[in-house]
Image (cartoon, rainbow, N blue to C red):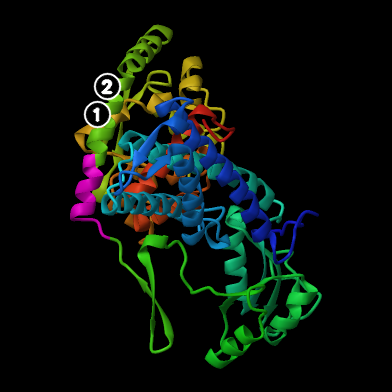
Amino acid sequence: MTTREPSASVVPFDWSRVYARRLAITDLLVLVWVVFGVQIAYFGLDANNVAFSGRLNELRFSYYGFSIALIVAWMVMLRLFDTRDYRVLGGGSAEYRAIADSAARLFGLVAVVSYLFQIDIARGYILIALPLGIVVLMLSRWMWRQWLSLKRQTGAYSARVVLVGSPTTALHIARELARHPEEGYFVVGACVTSGTVGTMLPGTSIPILGDVSDALSSLDSAAADTVVITGSEQLGPQEIKTLSWGLEAGQRHLIVAPSLTDVGGPRIHTRPVAGLPLIHVETPRYAGSKLFTKRAFDILGSGALIIVLSPVLIVLAFIVKLTSRGPVFYRQERVGLNGEHFDMLKFRSMRVDADAELSSLLAAQGTSGTPLFKVKDDPRVTPIGKVLRKHSLDEFPQLFNVFLGSMSLVGPRPQRDGEVALYDDAARRRLLLKPGMSGLWQVGGRSSLGWEDAIRLDLYYVENWSITGDVVILWRTIKAVLRPGNEAS
């Protein structure tokens, strides 16, 4: 693993303020466009002559004035709900939730004030401006997030991190942060037990800046703004407290990384007890209302997609039938929920009896004993099959598997008996949920994923699944299907 050299645009300590100001300007432009756009569309250009009355009949207010007040109040709510706080920028759904919460509270306040003072505001104007404003604000933030993600690939607009702890824990945290540069943590150095200045953290190009006792002085030498404590016997409660006292308030930050990985945010709750910052980690639940909701989501989603895509399914079926000899559909036995077998449907993308050739092809390329049975430049794939696989069109018939209950729209990757036979005890946990048409493996690399990465993504999904997460994965799947990369095959 190597570190990235920060670009020249990195602004230590105040990148978040620069970025937040840009977001504020964009938010204001969005709200002006939405609120006044809805006003003009609803009332026309003569809205200045349209007024609403208050509790006292002689008081009348112009909608232009109300729109301005609404924009100002909305901007205040976005600020109060920390929608531009550096902790929520760049990754996760917290930024979007804060935007939705601020808008909901604002319009709830408008409703209460209107009722108390008997102000007659056009309901259509409010009911259009609210959802439209939320959608356009989120779209604007999403566009900014794409820009920020590109910047963070080079180390810019990120917290500059010094890791403090043992070499083993520091290396573990460094690797996890390197997996997700879009989260905004750029490791610039490490202070580890018995560290020798001038050497590198084993297996990386991260410089060792000293021992754990050198953490504060290393911040200046590395132009860093964040200390991440990865764990060490030398750092007891008093040493960590002393370290936090030495950080410049509001400019430098302290993060304590527990020995937990692959745990989603909704499962984590912090609670201070007797001065101890206790972290509660909920155990995954695979029954009850959550499972019922997931099944309902699968039935409604797959049913709707079958109806909408039925013309496409019919056309693809004809193309497969007319371009190669054999049946339209291909049935393959896969391992599903709790190890039970089911027949997974696909449009046939290979020649007939292709399964009989698999063993010899795997042996020829020297991968007969490895998981994820993939044949490179597979000669069995038909010309039209290459197109179907590139855009995942061959998987559309799996919608019927989902509707009938053997699969889910989102879940772990459906695998064969030979692959399941290679599972260890941890990997077998992926059988606790139904396999999915899509999943983190689909949007995280597909055929380019190694065995360990594929298992890690599936286990993360099984441990942290939620309906909101399923919607996000499906959205990313649509983008992956429309714009397949080289890993699609």
Query: What segment is highlighted magenta in the picture?
Result: 285-296
Q: Position of residue 422 (x, y in %)?
A: 40, 52
Q: From this viewpoint, is residue 457 visible?
A: yes
| Quadrant of the image occupied by residue 89 | bottom right
Near mark 1 (Cα within 10 A), the count class, few <14, some 14-19 or many ≥20, is some
Residue depicted at x 58% and y 74%: 169
- Given the image, on which type of amino acid does mark 1 rest? Gly
Residue at 56% across / 53% down in the picture? Answer: 90
Q: Could you classify mark 2 by the number of other residues whose Cα lies within 10 Å: few (under 14), some (14-19), or many (20 or more)?
A: few
* Local secondary structure at mark 2: helix
Which residue lies at the image location 42% right of the left edge and 54% below the top edge? 102
Residue 288: in magenta span = yes
Q: In this view, does 248 lie to the left or right of 286?
A: right
Residue 318 image-quadrant placement: top left
Residue denoted by label 2: 307
Above or below 382: residue 128: below
Q: What element carries label 1?
A: helix
Q: Position of residue 408 (x, y in %)?
A: 29, 40
Check if mark 1's residue and mark 2's residue have beta carbons within 8 Å.
yes
The residue beneath circle 1 is 303
- Of 234 and 186, the residue lying toward us: 186
Q: Say whether residue 372 is visible.
A: no
